[in-house]
Image (cartoon, grey):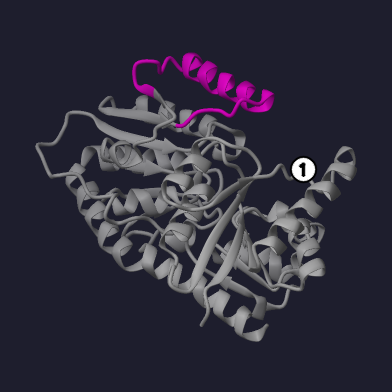
Amino acid sequence: MDKKLILYLSHCGSSIGGGEKQLAYLVTNIDRAHYHPFVVCPDDGIFAEYLRDADIPVLILDLPPWRKTKSLIARHTAARKLATLAETHNTHLVHTSDSWFNPYLWYLKKKLKIPIVSHARNLLTPTQVRKYKFDRMDSIIAISEQSKMPLLEARIDARKIDVILNCVDLSVFQPSPITATSEAYIVGIVGRIEPFKCQKAFVEIAAKVAAQCKKVRFHIIGAALDAPEHRTYAQDVRELVVKHRLQEIIHFAGHRTDMPNAMQELDLLVTLSAGSVIAEAMAAGKPVIGTPIGSAADMIVHGITGYIFPSEPIDEIANQIIEFANDPARSLSMGQRARKYAETAFGVETHVRQVQSVYEKLLIAG
């Protein structure tokens, strides 16, 4: 088939979170003999530069929140600019990695009569599904069975939905060489410091563990965005560490650009919000403990590559950490199984092939 231009809308261009990593995997590995990727970012910065360095065309175009009253004029101006851009480049399909941009996709579909794809990465409610026009999408990619459920509850046609798990570069995220066991057992949590990532609950887990086991250390990897609510939450996390007198065992690692190295420093990953970090940890040969949120239950094989604990999991997770710390050989063995599973489930090639299959169905139908 002729080479098709795919226009992507990125959540941001100024930072790299899980969604940006997944988009980068896709656009840098897509079949360039058949597809030509082009990314629109709402701002400039480290992610936009990363894409340019990878020879991915990038354009910066602010896309104001569609539903906010103060954006009424600006959003239509931005939508017209986006439509002109898409038409000028002879765009064949538009794919957003952030479902909040769905109204912009619907605008493009009406103007240009081209298929539109939305990636459902967030935990949505049926109300949000309706609010953000998922019913107008030609195809929806959900990152887990759980993220698919509210789409079905909002009566989205199941034939429009494909579940495609997040992926990881298995050549970059590698298990650590097996060396003499360290005295300390290192447990990490990774992600922006914000309420959704639940770092405060992680500190409470650390406090439970510290009361019973002295060999465990904790890494909080990530930083807060420069927004008032995020700065406040980050300060609350630090104050909670002081309250529990955990300054000596909790290390704030800040934002890391060398995540493969950061993962190798850990013995165990705890995630309270799911995301692509699960695939990264498992590829690095680390067991993962999570809760049934988002993609966690689809990615962690309970009792084989890690554990899924129910809501309000502080006591259960703390107890499991203590068990691992007292039996590091078992932790290591589970991490080795996690790597083997990652090789079969989270490869970039598999992910890209599944997304391209979605494109092909839409482009052939069109």
Quarter placement of the C terminus: bottom right
- Residue name at image x 25 percent, y 27 percent: 215
- Across and down, in percent, residue 202 comes to 47, 33
State the extent of the magenta-drawn residues as a range. 222-251
Determine whether, in the image, residue 233 is placed left or right of residue 324.
right
- Residue name at image x 83 percent, y 47 percent: 77
Q: How many numbered markers are drawn?
A: 1
Along the viewing direction, whichever of 325 and 2 lies nearer the viewer: 2
- Residue name at image x 75 percent, y 61 percent: 129
Compared to 17, does 137 lie above or below? below
Provide the secondary structure element on which disc 1 rests.
loop
Along the viewing direction, whichever of 184 and 155 lies nearer the viewer: 155
Compared to 218, does 23 lie above or below? below
Compared to 233, does 45 lie above or below? below
**Residue designated by label 1:** 64
Along the viewing direction, whichever of 113 and 163 lies nearer the viewer: 113
Asked if the magenta segment contains residue 245, the reply would be: yes
Along the viewing direction, whichever of 301 and 138 lies nearer the viewer: 138
Residue 125 visible in the picture:
no
- Across and down, in percent, residue 13 comes to 57, 41
- Across and down, in percent, residue 34 comes to 48, 74
- Residue name at image x 78 percent, y 57 percent: 103
- Across and down, in percent, residue 23 comes to 51, 54
